[in-house]
Amino acid sequence: MKITHDFHVHTHLSVCAKDSATVQHYANTAKKLGFNKIGFADHFWDEKCGEPWNNFYKRQGLDHVLELKKELEGVDFGNAKVYFGCETEYNPITKSPAITPAVAEQFDFIIVPNSHTHMMMPKELYEPYENHKQFMIDAYYNIINSEVSKYVLSMAHPFEAVCCPYDNEILMKLISDDEYRRIYDSTANKGIAVEINTSGVKNDKEAILASEKLRGFRIAKECGCKFTFGSDSHTDAGHDEYASVCGIFADVLGLTENDLAEFVR
């Protein structure tokens, strides 16, 4: 199955993105790859949720990310519909996403990671590994059971601990099949999708088949979860292998159109 959407794109408005991640670049990409839909998801922290846990988010407030709407005006995306969203952070203090319902209403969609542990997990939890794993599991449940869960389109790169000082697959291997089933049963019941994130994934079917993340996706599918795909692009090279990598995931998981979240079809 060909994937014709990307609902995890960062522009230069995300502090960690390159200047080359422009709206015009993504418009060109959407036309080149034949996207039907593209969702912009710059990093965001709602100031009404208190001081950001990490200094990174002090520049990622509402006024800042709203600048994207002006940049989108008049840009030709071909046949692709454009959606204004955000990747909001998990706040370990409030144990919920850092966005209020009133502000969530201003976005077309939101995605939330439970795996930005380099930003929002106390460093003493890196080891033993079991503590790191449990932090992500607790964060995951807190996100999908939060008051803003109805606005969450999908869980961004679930359990793929970002910028982990060791191989993050170690953590995924610690999650049992039964734990995954409980997690993804709850996710499906909430109507929240699971993101298949292609960032850093090589265009190599054998490597993808050997990836630990695939086990979680298989169980998510068995539990009735829907999926979204996201490049997590931060540069003008973020889609170099996107179409082929998405195709491999769709093929090995046996995905059909019905397995995609309705919002992205």
Image: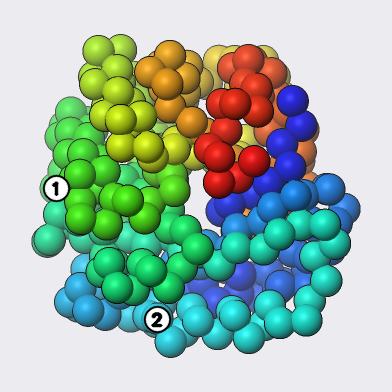
175 left or right of 257?
A: left
The amino acid at mark 2 is Leu
Q: Position of residue 71 (x, y in %)?
A: 67, 82
The amino acid at mark 1 is Glu
148 left or right of 131?
A: right
Foreground of the two, 16 or 222: 222
Mark drawn on residue 137: none
Quarter placement of the N terminus = top right
Read off the residue under disc 2: 62
Name the secondary structure under disc 1: helix
Q: Position of residue 190 (x, y in %)?
A: 31, 37
- Above or below: residue 265 compared with residue 256: below
- Identify the residue shown where x is 66% and y is 56%: 38
The quadrant where residue 104 appears: bottom left
Circle 2 or circle 1, nearest the eye? 2
Label 2 or label 1, whichever comes before in sequence order: 2
61 left or right of 33?
A: left
- Identify the residue shown where x is 20% and y is 55%: 147
Mark 2 in CB contact with mark 1 (< 8 angstroms): no
- Above or below: residue 214 compared with residue 21: above
The quadrant where residue 137 appears: top left
Q: Position of residue 48 (x, y in %)?
A: 22, 79
Name the secondary structure under disc 2: helix
- Identify the residue shown where x is 14% and y is 48%: 124
- Identify the residue shown where x is 32% and y is 51%: 150
Read off the residue under disc 1: 124
- Above or below: residue 224 compared with residue 28: above
Quarter placement of the C terminus = top right
